């Protein structure tokens, strides 16, 4: 007999979200559940942004919302009204508090403060080792990292590495109703580089640098670019950095295995990040909510459709080979289409008709050539 009915390895965004959706759907009643993570997540260690229509399941903890965004490159810009979509930001402090309150109410839940290793499928379920002891469960969900080396995969691969500052300025410089979605006005260095600015008040905002490329910078190099951008584009007056964040998201259509029998992979290691953008939060919540609805079978819902992954592979190939400049591709996409059409596509919610309309607005040669390569 297995030790548990269900085990979740990793108590970050993916693991906690899975337990939250499963409990809200009533799937854990009478179940023996184990959550394995070295620490209980409570701190402001992450910030997640996304767009959605109307109100979502985490509406009560949205820290700020924007209905208008700007995109800029060296030669053009556009300001877009996103409605019926809204761009939203959630901080991990509020997310952890909300989700932990639900997870802590699971009657059959046990917390194990440890690191899990040696995960494997078994004839009766799945197993792993923690603190030198082997644990078994009928089903194990793992959100542990599964790093790739871009040189060893045939699929397109770009890291999205980023660093952001939460700043407070001495003077009022930001418009809290307008987010800078992508600002490419920085040397591209043969990559796709942009800043985004999400203002909360006229003096408070998060300013972040994102780079699509497989060459990572030193911390002081990211900081130098951030410092220059703020001085050049926003203010030369004083400001304070109240918080920093950094990380890396794999942008790839590599087919991450999502299931090995009774061992299920979720989160970034399960391919939850949208390959063409790196955005993860919205698609992950949609995937896990559907898995909770379907439980106990099927075990896995794919985060993205095969059709959308083919589009993503096309764009990533173009960016990876530098066939078209990313700063032009993304700005033109929003300039030549209704913003809602672009956002629906990036959320994996678009119809085939709207996808055809979208494709009619991009450079035909490079996109058609790479699309056919990916299909074949």
Image (spheres, rainbow, N blue to C red):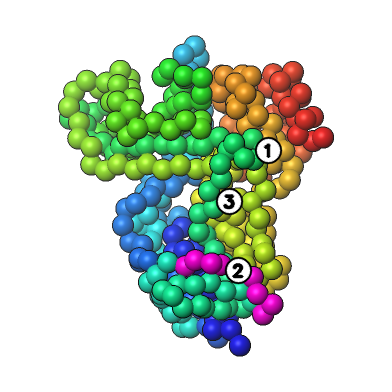
Badge number at residue 272: 3
Q: Identify the element where label 1 is drawn.
A: loop
Locate residue 324 relative to residue 49 in the image: left or right.
right
In this view, the mark in front (3 or 1): 1
Q: Main secondary structure of the magenta part?
A: strand
Q: Which residue is mark 1?
A: 154
Choose between 180 and 165: the one closer to the eye: 165
- Res. 221 mark: none
Residue 363 included in the magenta stretch of the image? no
Q: Quadrant of the N terminus?
A: bottom right
Instruction: Write down the residue under mark 2.
Output: 120
Residue 117 on the magenta span: yes
Which mark sits nearer the N-terminus, 2 or 3? 2
Residue 146 placement (x, y as % from top left): 54, 53
Which residue: 37% across, 41% down? 246
**Magenta region, residue range:** 116-124
Taking 334 as reference, is 114 above or below it?
Answer: below
Q: Residue at x 35, y 32 (%)?
A: 218
Give the alpha-carbon distance from disc 2 to disc 1, as whole Å: 26 Å
Q: Position of residue 201 (x, y in %)?
A: 29, 37
């Amino acid at each position: 007999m297995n030790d548990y009915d269900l085990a979740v390895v990793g108590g970050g965004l993916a693991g906690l979200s899975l337990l939250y959706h499963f409990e809200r759907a009533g799937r854990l009643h009478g179940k023996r559940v184990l959550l394995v993570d070295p620490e209980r997540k409570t701190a402001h260690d992450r910030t997640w942004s996304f767009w959605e229509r109307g109100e979502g399941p985490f509406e009560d903890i949205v820290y700020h919302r924007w209905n208008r965004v700007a995109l800029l490159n060296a030669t053009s810009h556009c300001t877009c009204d996103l409605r019926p979509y809204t761009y939203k930001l959630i901080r991990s402090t509020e997310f952890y508090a909300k989700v932990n309150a639900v997870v802590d109410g699971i009657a059959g839940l046990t917390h194990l403060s440890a690191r899990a290793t040696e995960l494997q499928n078994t004839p009766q379920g799945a197993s792993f080792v923690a603190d030198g002891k082997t644990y078994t469960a009928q089903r194990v969900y793992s959100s542990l990292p599964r790093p790739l080396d871009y040189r060893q995969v045939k699929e397109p691969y770009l890291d999205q590495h980023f660093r952001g500052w939460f700043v407070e300025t001495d003077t009022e410089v930001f418009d809290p109703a307008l987010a800078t979605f992508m600002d490419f006005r920085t040397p591209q260095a043969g990559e796709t580089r942009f800043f985004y600015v999400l203002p909360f008040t006229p003096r408070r905002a998060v300013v972040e640098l994102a780079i699509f490329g497989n060459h990572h910078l030193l911390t002081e190099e990211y900081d130098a670019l951030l410092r220059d951008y703020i001085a050049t584009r926003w203010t030369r007056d004083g400001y304070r950095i109240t918080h920093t964040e950094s990380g890396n998201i794999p942008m790839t259509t590599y087919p991450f295995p999502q299931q090995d029998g009774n061992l299920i992979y979720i989160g970034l290691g399960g391919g939850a990040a949208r390959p063409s953008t790196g955005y993860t939060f919205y698609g992950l919540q949609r995937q896990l909510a559907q898995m909770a609805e379907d439980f106990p079978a099927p075990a896995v819902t794919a985060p993205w459709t095969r059709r959308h992954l083919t589009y993503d592979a096309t764009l990533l190939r173009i960016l990876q080979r530098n066939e078209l400049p990313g700063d032009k591709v993304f700005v033109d996409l929003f300039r030549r289409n209704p913003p809602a059409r672009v956002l629906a596509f990036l959320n994996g919610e678009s119809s085939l008709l709207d996808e055809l309309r979208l494709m009619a607005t991009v450079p035909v040669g490079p996109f058609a050539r790479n699309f056919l390569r990916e299909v074949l």
